Amino acid sequence: MLKNIERAKTLLAAAKAAAEDASRKQALGITMASPIAAATHVLVSGGFTWNTEQSTAIDYTEFRKSFCLIGAAGTRKTTTLKGALLNALAKHRVPPLEAGTEHLSGGAPGVAIRELLFRPEWT
């Protein structure tokens, strides 16, 4: 019986998280074409669950919205970008380049990631 209570608590927490996620996406004006594939999560995340901010970054990438990903060292910024790109590629949201560039081959996915470092001593 204790096992059933724990399972019910887990299901309730998942339902609450899903409702919060839906409210967040509605507030941001994001309409999901389809849920992010679980296989992408497992492949990229190593078994952890994306938090709200990471999910937002993944959604923004899928729907080609600009965003700035900021966080301290070890907060999985790179992993989030990897997940976002793999999700977008898996859903064919990144068109291939028609012609090559100095760094990318023609026919390769056209993706640009910009890194900006800020250090107080630079001001």
Image: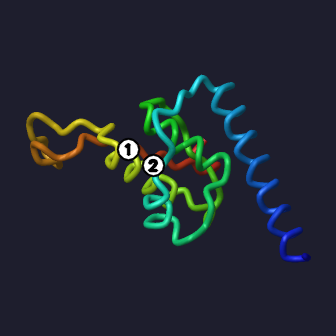
Where disc 2 sits, the SS reads: helix
Residue at horizontal 51 percent and vertical 44 percent from the top: 35
Count of all numbered marks drawn on residues in the image: 2
- Residue 6 lies left or right of residue 81; in this view the side is right
Residue at horizontal 45 percent and vertical 39 percent from the top: 61
Q: Tell me the distance, in whole angstroms, between the alpha carbons under discs 1 and 2.
A: 6 Å
Image coordinates of residue 27 in percent, x first then y, are: 69, 25
Q: Amino acid at mark 2?
A: Ala
Q: Tell which of 50 and 123 is nearer to you.
A: 50
Q: Disc 2 marks which residue?
A: 84
- Residue 112 lies left or right of residue 105; in this view the side is right
Q: Tell which of 14 and 112 is nearer to you.
A: 14
Image quarter of the N terminus: bottom right
Quadrant of the image occupied by residue 114: top left
Q: Tell which of 43 and 35 is nearer to you.
A: 35
- Residue 7 lies left or right of residue 52; in this view the side is right
Q: Residues within 10 Å of mark 1 (few under 14, many from 20)?
A: many
Q: Which mark is residue 88?
A: 1
Q: Amino acid at mark 1?
A: Ala
Q: Are marks 1 and 2 in contact (CB under 8 Å)?
A: yes
Task: Indicate the colouring scheme.
Answer: rainbow
Q: Tell which of 72 and 2 is nearer to you.
A: 2
User: In this rendering, is residue 93 above or below 70?
Assistant: above
Q: Residues within 10 Å of mark 2 (few under 14, many from 20)?
A: many
User: In this rendering, is residue 12 above or below 66?
Assistant: below
Image coordinates of residue 10 in percent, x first then y, are: 79, 62
Image coordinates of residue 62 in percent, x first then y, are: 43, 38
